[in-house]
Image: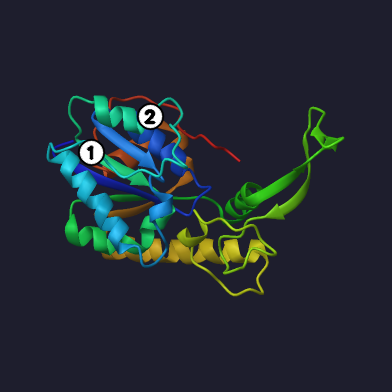
Amino acid sequence: MDDTRLIFGLGSGRCGTTSLATLLNGIPGVVCFHESNAMGMAWSGAEHAVHSVLNDFQAVLAGGPRAVSVDLGAYRPLEGFDPLHRLKTLERVRAIGDVASWYLPYVELILEREPNAVFPCLRRDRQETVESFVRKVTVLRPRTLGGRPFGKRRQVAAQRQRNHWVDHDGSRWIASPRYDRCFPHYEQGLTLEQAIGRYHDAYYRTAEALAARHPGAVRVFDVTALNSAAGQAGILDFCGITAAAGYRPAHVNRG
């Protein structure tokens, strides 16, 4: 890594974004968060939050206070790495970043302020992404006996689902104040699967268009790149990071 750098990982979600953050945190001198401030973000109208992230990250790289805005209500250490701990303890931070789907609408805003920022974007198969999201947003009803959970399989039937992709009042879908704002919204008549599919399609059309306009800053990688030494090296090389040779398993949250 020849100079300091900001890295903003992209991807629709359920496509390896946690794994990307884990991979980057395994590189000396790199700190990478995963969805660091969901409560402060939104799919549109969150320019102030993006500027705040840039202010924090640029200050860290300039040798200023090692302090960033983090949504502690959702923050959890990554597998084997705690980005907050890394931020405090690394002798020198040479690259810092965050991986979250919701940076996609703000790529060009970020590039205006930080022309050297890079945006590796992961893409997973459309149907796999839809199915994974449906599993994630489905809340299961616990098996009970006398009002108390029992049995080894305590989750037995779908009760309700979250739907981040439509405007709703919480009567049909479970409201999620933290994440509902972080996705684009479509018309009410769509099924959950249709809405997620439309989101996936629109997300990667935008990502590919940005990659065409800014080929040195944005690149779309298939999620399978995380599963090989060559694939990981390709991602890191695009980010301007030279890492020691060797494959480190990084694809977490499978399914």
The residue furthest right is 146
Q: Nearer the viewer, mark 1 or mark 2?
A: 2
Say whether residue 12 is left or right of residue 90: right
Quadrant of the rendering where the C terminus is positioned:
top right
Q: Is residue 117 visible?
A: no
Residue position for label 2: 82
Residue that appears at 30% across and 28% down: 86
Crowdedness of circle 2 by 10 Å Cα count: few (<14), some, many (20+)? some
Residue that appears at 46% across and 42% down: 73
The secondary element bearing badge 1 is classed as strand
In percent of width and height, residue 109 lies at 25, 63
User: Residue 95 shows which numbered tag?
Assistant: 1
In percent of width and height, residue 165 lies at 56, 64
Q: Is residue 162 visible?
A: yes
User: Residue 74 shows which numbered tag?
Assistant: none
Sequence-first tag of 1 and 2: 2
What is the three-letter code of the residue carrying label 2? Asp
Q: Is residue 160 above or below residue 151?
A: below
What is the three-letter code of the residue carrying label 1? Ala
Q: How was the colour assigned to the protein in this rendering?
A: rainbow
